[in-house]
Amino acid sequence: MNATSTIPVLFTIVSLFFQQTLIADDDKSTGTSELKIDSVLVSLIEEVEVPAREVGQLNTIKVKEGMTVEKGEVLAQIEDSEAMLLLQQAKLEYEMARLKAANDVDLRFARKAYEVANAELQRAEDSIKKYPKSISKTELDRLKLTAEKSELEIEQASEERKTTQLEASLKRNAEQIANLAVQRRKVVSPIKGMVVQIMIRNGEWVRPGDTVLRILRLDRLRAEGLINASRLQEQDLMNHPVTLVVNPGTQQVMEFQGKISFVSPEINPVNNQTRVWAEIENLDLKLKPGMRASLIIK
């Protein structure tokens, strides 16, 4: 084979080499579009020790360990007989004050009395104009005083009604305070989660701040790990979708979906790593706090 015939063959080989190089580069760039953290720790986002808010005897515990509770659900009840009686008293006092404030009989009577007194004074003055000596000066002064008194009684009745309305507002406030005292004797769940520990049993005495139960939120967990800052390449990972893989490479492999919720702004100067965590949906409660897994950031 002469040199002229070998040139096309060499050109073909070089072309194929460059094509394979470009394909390999494309595959490499595609592979790096996802970041993988080989080891992350699954932990809780919310854990609550539910306290008593009033002093008293714990009468009832409505839940057991392992039960799932909703936010706002009543978990236990502190004895509230006295608080209920005070609430009933406050309700009655408010109702009495409300009816008194709504009663405007005194004000209407004062207005009517003023109309009568003013009309009587007007008739007397008209009579004096026609018959100057028909009514004495003393009688005329008495009629004027009666009319002025009736006018002042309107003002007095109006002010008293304002006072009774304020008293009704005070009684309404007292009723709300009494109702709050009743509500504070209920131990209520502040989150949706699972009861994992009951600290105090029926009949025991509690004080404000004593922990009655411990609740964990399990339907959403946190997966936290470390990633080399150089792999981020100035990417903004916030809210990126992720897949959490538990037991990879085994028959018990499980996958859970979530998204990045935090990327630490701090970088460890020793190993150039930064903390990243994602919130993982766990509606079937198969994922457990304390598990180790892999995290794929898409």
Image (spheres, rainbow, N blue to C red):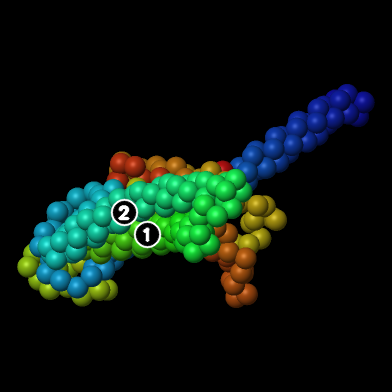
Disc 1 marks which amino acid? Thr
Residue 147 vs residue 1: left or right? left
Place of residue 227 in the rendered image (x, y in percent of width and height, measured from the top left): 56, 60
Helix, strand or loop for disc 2: helix
Which residue is depicted at the point 61% across and 48% down? 129
Disc 2 marks which amino acid? Lys
Return the residue nearer the eye: 35 or 105.
105
For residue 164, which numbered disc appears in the image?
1
Return the residue nearer the eye: 129 or 279.
129
Q: How crowded is the residue under tag 1: few (<14 C-alpha within 10 Å), some, or many (20+)?
A: some
Return the residue nearer the eye: 8 or 225.
225
Mark-to-mark CA distance, 2 and 1: 7 Å
The image quadrant that residue 157 belongs to is: bottom left
Place of residue 8 in the rendered image (x, y in percent of width and height, measured from the top left): 86, 25
Which of the two discs, 2 and 1, labels the residue nearer the N terminus?
2
Which residue is depicted at the point 73% across and 38% down? 21
Q: How crowded is the residue under tag 2: few (<14 C-alpha within 10 Å), some, or many (20+)?
A: some
Place of residue 258 in the rendered image (x, y in percent of width and height, measured from the top left): 47, 45
Helix, strand or loop for disc 1: helix
Return the residue nearer the eye: 286 or 16.
286
Residue 95 vs residue 38: left or right? left
Q: Quadrant of the C terminus?
A: top right
289, above or below 247, in the image: below
The image quadrant that residue 22 belongs to is: top right
Residue position marked by numbered label 2 in the rendering: 100
